[in-house]
């Protein structure tokens, strides 16, 4: 497993932007598929975005496509989530996760709260 620490959450007005970061340590970062998930109060955790070892293998939930961008810096062992045009329904605790391709996510961060006010 790999250790993950998220940062960058906060309070922002609708239409604003935030960039989340997730710093990884413990294993060879570039070997992992990295994902972002979110969980709002009273709701199930949902997939937001994922990225393979290169920027060409990025995937997004329909709800964030065109507004969010996932990226990674394998030299800094960090994955990012740039969130633009934020909406109140984006309010949630955002989690970073890691997995080996073909397997389930098995490393999770502690989460960072994003709150979007209307």
Image (tube, rainbow, N blue to C red):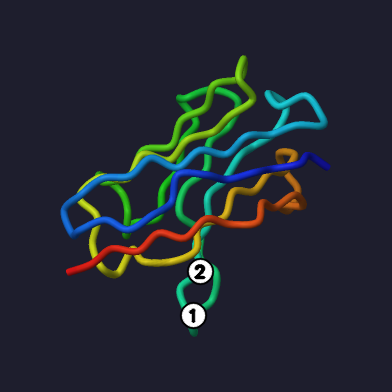
In the structure shown, which secondary structural element does the residue marked by tag 2 occupy?
strand
112 is higher (above) or lower (below) than 3: below
31 is higher (above) or lower (below) than 84: above
Label drawn at residue 39 = 2
Task: Say which quadrant the C terminus sits in.
Answer: bottom left
Residue at (46% x, 30% y) in the render: 71
Residue at (49% x, 63% y) in the render: 93
Task: Say which quadrant the N terminus sits in.
Answer: top right
| Crowd around label 1: few <14 · some 14–19 · many ≥20 (10 Å) | few
| Crowd around label 2: few <14 · some 14–19 · many ≥20 (10 Å) | some
Residue that protrudes farthest toward the bottom in the picture: 42
Give left or right: position of 8 versus 12. right
Percent across and percent down for residue 30 are 68, 23
Percent across and percent down for residue 82 are 36, 39
Residue at (45% x, 54% y) in the render: 48
Query: How far, Cα to Cα, is label 1 from label 2?
Result: 6 Å
Label 1–label 2 contact, CB within 8 A: yes
Which quadrant of the structure image shows residue 98?
Answer: top right
Viewer-nearest residue: 113 or 66: 113
Residue that protrudes farthest toward the top in the picture: 75
Count the labels in the image: 2
Give left or right: position of 28 versus 12. right
Label drawn at residue 43 = 1
Label drawn at residue 20 = none
Give left or right: position of 18 versus 107. left
In the structure shown, which secondary structural element does the residue marked by tag 1 occupy?
loop
Viewer-nearest residue: 92 or 47: 92
């Amino acid at each position: 497993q790999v250790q993950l620490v998220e940062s960058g959450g906060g309070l922002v007005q609708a239409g604003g932007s935030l960039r989340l970061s997730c710093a990884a340590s413990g294993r060879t970062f570039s070997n992992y598929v990295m994902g972002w998930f979110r969980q709002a109060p009273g709701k199930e955790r949902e997939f937001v975005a994922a990225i393979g070892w290169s920027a060409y293998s990025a995937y997004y939930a329909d709800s964030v496509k065109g507004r969010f961008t996932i990226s990674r810096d394998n030299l800094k062992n960090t994955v990012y989530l740039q969130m633009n045009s934020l909406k109140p329904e984006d309010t949630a605790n955002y989690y970073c996760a890691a997995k080996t391709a073909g397997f389930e996510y098995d490393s999770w961060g502690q989460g960072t709260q994003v709150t979007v006010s209307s």
